[in-house]
Each structure stands twice: as C-alpha cells, then as structure tokens.
Image (tube, rainbow, N blue to C red):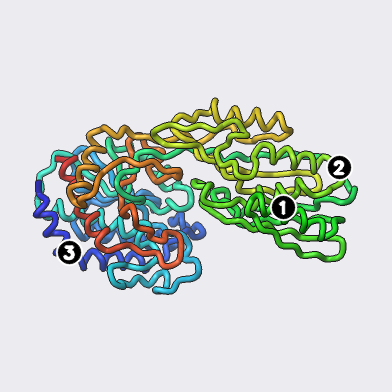
Amino acid sequence: MYRKEIEEFIEAHRQEMLDDICTLCRINSEKMPYKEGMPYGQGAFTALSEALSMAEAYGFSITNYDNYVGTADLNDKERQLDILAHLDVVPAGEGWKETEPFEPVVKGDKLFGRGTADDKGPAVAALYAMRAVKELGVPLKKNARLILGTDEECGSSDIAHYYAIEKEAPMTFSPDGSYPVVNTEKGSLNGHFTASFAPSEALPKLVSVEAGLKVNVVPGKARAVVQGIDVEVMEKAAEAVTGETGIRFEFEVEEDFATITAIGEGAHASKPEEGNNALTGLLVLIQRLPFAACEQISTTHRLLELIPHGDTSGKALGIAMSDEVSGDLTLAFSLLTISDSELDGTFDSRCPICATKENVLDVAKAKMAEKGFTLLNDSMRPPHHVDGDSEFISTLLRTYEEYTGRKGECIAIGGGTYVHELKNGVAFGAAMPETDNRMHGADEFAVIEELIVSAKMFAQVIIDLCS
C-alpha cells in the first residue's frame, strides 16, 4: 500500500535529497576535542545543528539532547519505530583520488565523500522517507522517530546519554550496515592479559617484542629485537618457519643486535582467517631460535601454546564453539609487547550466541592461569540477537524483497553495530550485500540508486509498522 505514491515522491525529490546529503558531507564531523556545549567538538556540533535545522524546515518536531543526539518526530503519537543513524565520521585519512574527503562529488552512479555511506547518506535517506510519509498525508496510529547520533565511531557514548533519558522504542533499525537484515551480532571478549618474570642478562637474549596496531586488527607486521644470535642462524630458522606459516621475515643487523620484522597479512579481527597473523608467526620463529634459558623465553613459549599460529577458533584456549545462528567463535591475537621483565597482550574474540561468561571468559581465564598468565577481564560483551520470525523482521524482509526483487534473509555478523545494546534493534541497509562502500577508507562512496531505494523502503516500513 502506497508504494506508487512513495516511488513518485522520492523520485521527484531525488536531487534535493542528494543536495542535502552533500550539505552534511561537507562538514568534517570527526570527533574533536571537547568544547563547552560541544561534547565531541565543533565538527559534530555543526553537523548535528545543520541536520536538525534541515528536519525542522521540513516540518518535523525536533529535540536536541545536549548536543549529543538530536531527534525528529513524525507525529506526537505513541512511539513505535526508531531509526537510529549517526552524523559523525572517521578521520579523512590519506589516499583519496576521486575527490577531497569533505568535497562530495557525483561520478557516474556513485556519490563520493567521507560520510556518504557511513552514515550521513543513509541518515538523509531516512529523513526523506519521513518526508514522504508526512507530505503524502499517510494516516498513522503511531510515531516514527529519526535519531541522529554524533559518537558512533568512537564508542557510542552519545547513545548512552540518550537512552539514559529516553526509553527504547518497541522497534529500532539502524541504516548503518548492509541488507537484507542483520539481526545477530556476535558478542566479544577483548582479552587483556599480562605476565611478569625475572630479568636475565644471559646471551643470546630476546630484547623486546612490539606487535599490533589496534585490538580489532590482525597484525600484518610484528617486530622483535634480539641480541647475540648470528644472522645466518636466524635466516635458516626463518626459512623453515616461512615454509610452514607463509610469514616472511626481514632482518636489520647492527653490531650484536638484530631487528626481526615478520610480515604477514592484516585483516579485520572479526574475520581473522582472512589474514595471516604476523604476531603469532613471529612467536613461532622466536620459539626456534637458540636463546639462553630464562623465564622470559619459557613464558613466551607457553604463550604460543595457548594461541598457536593459525588457531583462529580459540581451540587451544579451550573456547572453540559454534552455533547454527551465528557461526563459529573467532579469535585474533592482535597486540603484544614483551620486555626483559614483563609481557602484555590482547586478543580479540568474537563470540556466538551460545557463548557465556562461564564457557568463554571463565575458561580462558583458568587456562591462561595454568600457563602463568593473568587475564584481567571480569566481563565480556554479550551477543545480540533479535527473533527473525517477529512481525518487525518480517516487515523489513518483505519490504526488501518487494522493492529489490531479491531474497530477504537474516544475517549474522562478527562486528557490532549501533543497535547492539538495544533489545529489539537490527541493522537494515543501506548498502546492498555486494557493495563495498570503502567505509573508513579512501574514496568512500554510496551508490546513488541504493540510497534512493533505501529511502523508498524506509518510507514503506514506517507506514507498515506505524499504521
């Protein structure tokens, strides 16, 4: 019902919608230092102010929650549906070729610029869906609210502030993912562990290890400094390890010291099997080198027993598990430093629906304690799952099928979205399954037709759920 009217309205306002997206995308809204009245700095404040002014000009009742979050309401009736989007962006980064990061431009069927896909483009598509419903005069029994956050990329403290004031709507979707519907998000354990040992001056020795950039990235490189080992010995051991693991090694020698660089392949920690972990590859090489016996070396060897190279399922740690809904537990060893007296490491584990504190955290903590490591975590982020047979999900999937001609189905992901903490929240759009928008990278783009059809689908969903 109302599909013809929705289609005509959105098509008639196509250019206006793109212009509004570009207006917001010209604002650098990455997180900046706090200013009075601007919790995330000038850029986020400006983007929120502009978006709320836009919504108000289209006749919506707006509310500003202390410049953390802004909302636009379709009517003053009981809330039924929230659409949760965000206006902050990741830093511009380097390597842009199609345009400058904050100079959005249309080329062919794509709109390039930071925020076009993540998440200003989808936010404006949702605003135009609400415009369509409002200006077409569709009678509704309940309210739909567009929620515009400003800190999704750096921890979602904006939403924590909002939900400390407002209650969750019965249904929420976020257009900050991909189609069809993401109703399952794995839980996570960022396992931070330490160990200490007595220093040793005996040669040959391991001076230090430095590996990893971020907890959610499989290290593509890792480095160690060693003292007192001939380079020929290291190269021979490295050749064997390369043959076994695929990790390459480079050596820089200066007098009695050598810097070893392990080179693998980075990946997102939610899909560690797609990379080749340079950190664990480096530990394999360290295990093969003729260091003098000491507590540091024996501790390092025991660490490799807990997280062997290639073990991306947590099998050696005793936490491997799987379920039909969300798939396998994954584990990426992502950060490690070793000095002469202490070791500090972190692994990133994405945990399926069947995971609990008892069968993941407690097991890992006990297993690591057996080997002399202290796992510092006391809690883990639980998985998120919304019933795929609910009226809410059925409506989203039916709308997707009607407007795209594709099969609608629920999907599970290893990462977390804006709705992870919401009881009845899912991700719905705004990218088609095959589209790589280069989110967080150079030349981020949105496919224009995907934004247009998203606006149409969002309008249909509002009508179907709020009538």
- Please tell me which residue is depicted at 62% across the width and 44% down the height of the picture: 346
Counting from the top left corner in percent of width and height, residue 215 is at 57, 48
Label 2 and label 1: CA atoms lie apart by 22 Å
Q: Which amino acid does label 1 sit on?
A: Ala
Counting from the top left corner in percent of width and height, residue 7 is at 13, 57
Counting from the top left corner in percent of width and height, residue 405 is at 20, 50
Helix, strand or loop at mark 1 = helix
Helix, strand or loop at mark 3 = loop
- Please tell me which residue is depicted at 63% across the width and 40% down the height of the picture: 192
Per the rendering, the mark at residue 293 is: 2
Q: What residue type is labelled 2?
A: Ala
Residue 463, picture quadrant:
top left
Identify the residue under disc 3.
Answer: 13
Sort mark 1 into few (<14), some (14-19) or many (20+) by Cα contacts within 10 Å. few
- Please tell me which residue is depicted at 19% across the width and 43% down the height of the picture: 76
Instruction: Specify whether 281 is left or right of 257.
Output: left
Residue 414, picture quadrant:
top left
Label 2 and label 3: CA atoms lie apart by 73 Å
Identify the residue under disc 1.
Answer: 240
Please tell me whether mark 2 or mark 1 is closer to you in this view: 1
Answer whether labels 2 and 1 touch (C-beta < 8 Å).
Answer: no
Instruction: Please report whichever mark, 3 or 1, sits nearer to the chain's N-terminal start.
Output: 3
Q: Is residue 64 visible?
A: no
The residue closer to the viewer here, 123 or 325, is 325
Counting from the top left corner in percent of width and height, residue 196 is at 77, 39
Q: What residue type is labelled 3?
A: His
